[in-house]
Amino acid sequence: MSLVKGIKKGKTIELLEEINIPDGEEILIDILSVNNFWTSLETFRNSQEFNDVNFEEEIFTNLRDQTNGRNVDL
């Protein structure tokens, strides 16, 4: 099973990526309405077992870029 995003237009659903099945192949679609980013993020966070992941603190020590970035003329 794969998850493919699409947009409904009338009775047609336009897929946003190629799928590798022959034309005329019958498929089953499980409808999941995408509410918004935050709702989707919350659903994802609740579906994962992040408490079981043991990250070591030093992995994140030098993760962020420490440079000042570019100069901005105002």
Image: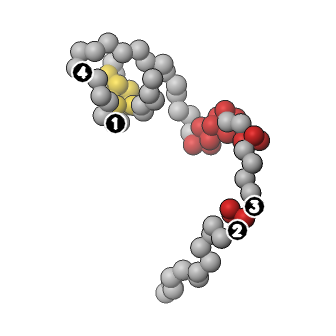
Amino acid identity at mark 4: Pro
Of pointers 2 and 4, the one earlier in the residue sequence: 4
Which residue is under mark 2? Answer: 61
The residues tagged by marks 1 and 3 sit, at their Cα atoms, a distance apart of 38 Å
SS type, badge 3 = helix
Amino acid identity at mark 1: Glu
- Number of the front mark, 3 or 4: 3
Which residue is under mark 3? Answer: 57
Which residue is under mark 1? Answer: 17
Amino acid identity at mark 3: Glu
4 and 58: which is toward the camera: 58
Q: What residue is rendered at 66% in x and 32% in y?
A: 47
- Number of the front mark, 1 or 3: 3
SS type, badge 2 = loop
Residue 72 at x, y = what percent? 51, 84
Q: What residue is rendered at 71% in x and 36% in y?
A: 49
The residues tagged by marks 3 and 4 sit, at their Cα atoms, a distance apart of 48 Å
SS type, badge 1 = loop
The residues tagged by marks 1 and 2 sit, at their Cα atoms, a distance apart of 37 Å
Of pointers 3 and 4, the one earlier in the residue sequence: 4
Amino acid identity at mark 2: Thr
Of pointers 1 and 4, the one earlier in the residue sequence: 1
Mark 3–mark 2 CB contact (< 8 Å): yes
16 and 2: which is toward the camera: 2
> Badge 1: few (under 14), some or many (20 or more) residues near its Cα, within 10 Å?
few
Q: In which quarter of the image is residue 15?
A: top left
Which residue is under mark 4? Answer: 22
Of pointers 1 and 3, the one earlier in the residue sequence: 1
Mark 3–mark 4 CB contact (< 8 Å): no
Mark 1–mark 3 CB contact (< 8 Å): no
- Number of the front mark, 1 or 4: 4
